[in-house]
Image (cartoon, rainbow, N blue to C red):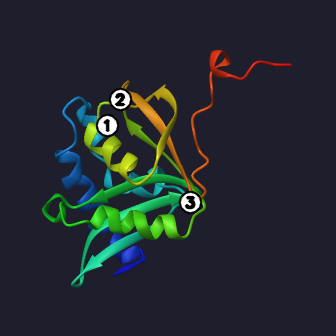
Amino acid sequence: MIRAATPEDMPVILEIWRRAARTAPPFLPEDARQPAGETIPLRLPDCAIQVLDADGHVVGFAAMREDHLEALFVDPKAQGYGHGSELMARTMAVHDRITLRVHSRNVRAVSFYRRLGFHALDEAVDPLSGEPEILMIWSREGQCRPRASREDAPPEN
Protein backbone atom coordinates (compact mmCIF):
# COMPACT_ATOMS: atom_id res chain seq x y z
CA MET A 1 0.00 0.00 0.00
CA ILE A 2 1.27 3.46 -0.86
CA ARG A 3 0.42 6.21 1.57
CA ALA A 4 1.57 9.65 2.67
CA ALA A 5 4.54 9.58 5.03
CA THR A 6 3.98 10.52 8.65
CA PRO A 7 6.49 12.02 11.08
CA GLU A 8 6.77 8.55 12.62
CA ASP A 9 8.04 7.23 9.26
CA MET A 10 11.05 9.56 9.17
CA PRO A 11 13.47 7.25 11.06
CA VAL A 12 12.59 4.39 8.69
CA ILE A 13 12.92 6.67 5.65
CA LEU A 14 16.37 7.71 6.88
CA GLU A 15 17.41 4.08 7.40
CA ILE A 16 16.21 3.11 3.90
CA TRP A 17 18.18 6.05 2.48
CA ARG A 18 21.30 4.95 4.39
CA ARG A 19 21.01 1.30 3.33
CA ALA A 20 20.42 2.27 -0.31
CA ALA A 21 23.35 4.70 -0.17
CA ARG A 22 25.66 1.87 0.86
CA THR A 23 24.86 0.19 -2.47
CA ALA A 24 25.18 3.43 -4.45
CA PRO A 25 27.59 3.52 -7.39
CA PRO A 26 31.19 3.61 -6.12
CA PHE A 27 32.05 6.75 -8.11
CA LEU A 28 30.12 8.89 -5.61
CA PRO A 29 32.14 10.29 -2.70
CA GLU A 30 31.08 9.02 0.73
CA ASP A 31 29.68 12.37 1.87
CA ALA A 32 27.41 12.48 -1.18
CA ARG A 33 26.05 9.00 -0.40
CA GLN A 34 25.22 9.32 3.29
CA PRO A 35 22.40 11.56 4.53
CA ALA A 36 22.69 13.02 8.00
CA GLY A 37 19.59 12.17 10.02
CA GLU A 38 18.73 15.68 11.03
CA THR A 39 19.16 17.01 7.50
CA ILE A 40 16.50 14.88 5.79
CA PRO A 41 13.88 17.61 6.25
CA LEU A 42 16.44 20.14 4.99
CA ARG A 43 17.42 18.00 1.99
CA LEU A 44 13.78 17.35 1.13
CA PRO A 45 12.20 20.72 1.93
CA ASP A 46 8.56 21.16 1.03
CA CYS A 47 8.40 17.64 -0.36
CA ALA A 48 5.37 15.40 -0.41
CA ILE A 49 6.74 12.02 0.63
CA GLN A 50 4.91 8.82 -0.24
CA VAL A 51 5.93 5.52 1.34
CA LEU A 52 5.38 1.99 0.16
CA ASP A 53 4.10 -0.04 3.08
CA ALA A 54 4.41 -3.81 2.51
CA ASP A 55 2.85 -5.95 5.22
CA GLY A 56 3.18 -3.18 7.80
CA HIS A 57 6.78 -2.31 6.94
CA VAL A 58 7.91 0.74 4.97
CA VAL A 59 10.19 -0.57 2.22
CA GLY A 60 10.57 2.50 0.00
CA PHE A 61 9.70 6.13 -0.53
CA ALA A 62 9.34 8.80 -3.19
CA ALA A 63 9.75 12.49 -2.40
CA MET A 64 8.26 15.08 -4.76
CA ARG A 65 8.61 18.86 -4.65
CA GLU A 66 5.87 20.08 -6.96
CA ASP A 67 6.67 18.28 -10.25
CA HIS A 68 10.28 17.37 -9.39
CA LEU A 69 11.27 13.97 -7.98
CA GLU A 70 13.82 14.76 -5.28
CA ALA A 71 14.35 11.18 -4.09
CA LEU A 72 13.28 7.62 -4.83
CA PHE A 73 14.73 4.91 -2.61
CA VAL A 74 13.83 1.28 -1.99
CA ASP A 75 15.43 -0.73 0.80
CA PRO A 76 18.08 -2.94 -0.86
CA LYS A 77 16.54 -5.98 0.86
CA ALA A 78 13.27 -5.23 -0.96
CA GLN A 79 14.70 -4.35 -4.38
CA GLY A 80 13.86 -6.45 -7.41
CA TYR A 81 10.17 -6.85 -6.54
CA GLY A 82 8.83 -3.87 -8.49
CA HIS A 83 8.53 -1.52 -5.52
CA GLY A 84 10.34 1.34 -7.28
CA SER A 85 8.09 0.90 -10.31
CA GLU A 86 5.04 0.85 -8.06
CA LEU A 87 6.07 4.09 -6.34
CA MET A 88 6.73 5.70 -9.71
CA ALA A 89 3.41 4.48 -11.16
CA ARG A 90 1.55 6.15 -8.28
CA THR A 91 3.60 9.33 -8.66
CA MET A 92 3.05 9.40 -12.42
CA ALA A 93 -0.70 8.86 -11.93
CA VAL A 94 -1.05 12.12 -10.01
CA HIS A 95 1.32 14.32 -12.04
CA ASP A 96 1.11 15.46 -15.65
CA ARG A 97 4.86 16.08 -15.79
CA ILE A 98 7.82 14.99 -13.70
CA THR A 99 11.45 16.06 -13.77
CA LEU A 100 14.37 14.48 -11.95
CA ARG A 101 18.16 14.50 -11.85
CA VAL A 102 20.23 11.32 -12.02
CA HIS A 103 23.98 10.75 -12.20
CA SER A 104 25.01 9.96 -15.76
CA ARG A 105 27.19 7.03 -14.64
CA ASN A 106 24.33 5.45 -12.69
CA VAL A 107 23.36 3.31 -15.67
CA ARG A 108 20.88 1.22 -13.69
CA ALA A 109 18.89 4.29 -12.61
CA VAL A 110 19.07 5.97 -16.03
CA SER A 111 17.78 2.75 -17.66
CA PHE A 112 15.00 2.45 -15.05
CA TYR A 113 13.72 5.97 -15.77
CA ARG A 114 14.02 5.50 -19.54
CA ARG A 115 11.86 2.36 -19.30
CA LEU A 116 9.25 4.49 -17.53
CA GLY A 117 9.25 6.96 -20.44
CA PHE A 118 11.63 9.65 -19.16
CA HIS A 119 13.86 11.44 -21.65
CA ALA A 120 17.10 13.36 -21.18
CA LEU A 121 16.51 17.09 -21.32
CA ASP A 122 19.82 18.58 -20.19
CA GLU A 123 23.17 17.73 -18.59
CA ALA A 124 24.99 19.48 -15.76
CA VAL A 125 27.49 18.78 -12.99
CA ASP A 126 26.18 17.81 -9.55
CA PRO A 127 27.75 20.40 -7.21
CA LEU A 128 27.85 17.94 -4.29
CA SER A 129 29.63 15.06 -6.03
CA GLY A 130 31.25 16.80 -9.01
CA GLU A 131 29.74 14.06 -11.19
CA PRO A 132 27.85 14.69 -14.43
CA GLU A 133 24.11 14.34 -14.07
CA ILE A 134 21.17 14.23 -16.44
CA LEU A 135 18.00 16.26 -16.07
CA MET A 136 15.25 13.89 -17.20
CA ILE A 137 11.61 14.64 -17.89
CA TRP A 138 8.41 12.67 -18.32
CA SER A 139 5.07 13.99 -19.50
CA ARG A 140 1.71 12.29 -19.70
CA GLU A 141 1.40 13.55 -23.27
CA GLY A 142 4.85 12.24 -24.18
CA GLN A 143 5.76 15.59 -25.70
CA CYS A 144 8.87 16.16 -23.61
CA ARG A 145 11.76 15.73 -25.99
CA PRO A 146 15.15 17.41 -25.87
CA ARG A 147 15.23 20.73 -27.65
CA ALA A 148 16.62 20.53 -31.16
CA SER A 149 19.99 22.11 -31.65
CA ARG A 150 20.31 24.99 -34.09
CA GLU A 151 21.66 22.59 -36.72
CA ASP A 152 18.60 20.35 -36.33
CA ALA A 153 16.09 23.17 -36.59
CA PRO A 154 14.01 23.42 -39.77
CA PRO A 155 15.17 26.12 -42.21
CA GLU A 156 13.68 29.55 -41.67
CA ASN A 157 11.68 31.01 -44.53
Which residue bears the numbered disc 3? 46
Depth check: give the residue in front, 111 or 77: 111
- Circles 2 and 1 in contact, beta carbons < 8 Å: yes
Which residue bears the numbered disc 2? 129
Q: Looking at the picture, how far across and down is residue 151, in whole percent?
A: 64, 15
User: Along the horizontal axis of the image, is 143 left or right of 110?
Assistant: right
- SS at mark 3? loop
How much space separates mark 2 and mark 3, taking CA atoms?
Answer: 23 Å
Q: Earlier in the sequence, mark 2 or mark 1?
A: 1
Residue at point 32%, 73% (across, down) = 52
Q: Looking at the picture, how far across and down is residue 77, in whole percent?
A: 13, 62
Q: Earlier in the sequence, mark 1 or mark 3?
A: 1
User: Quadrant of the rendered structure where residue 56 is?
Assistant: bottom left
Residue at point 53%, 56% (across, down) = 45
Q: Earlier in the sequence, mark 2 or mark 3?
A: 3
- SS at mark 1? helix
Amino acid carrying mark 2 in the image: Ser
Residue at point 60%, 61% (across, down) = 96
Amino acid carrying mark 3 in the image: Asp
How much space separates mark 2 and mark 1, taking CA atoms?
Answer: 6 Å
How much space separates mark 1 and mark 3, taking CA atoms?
Answer: 21 Å
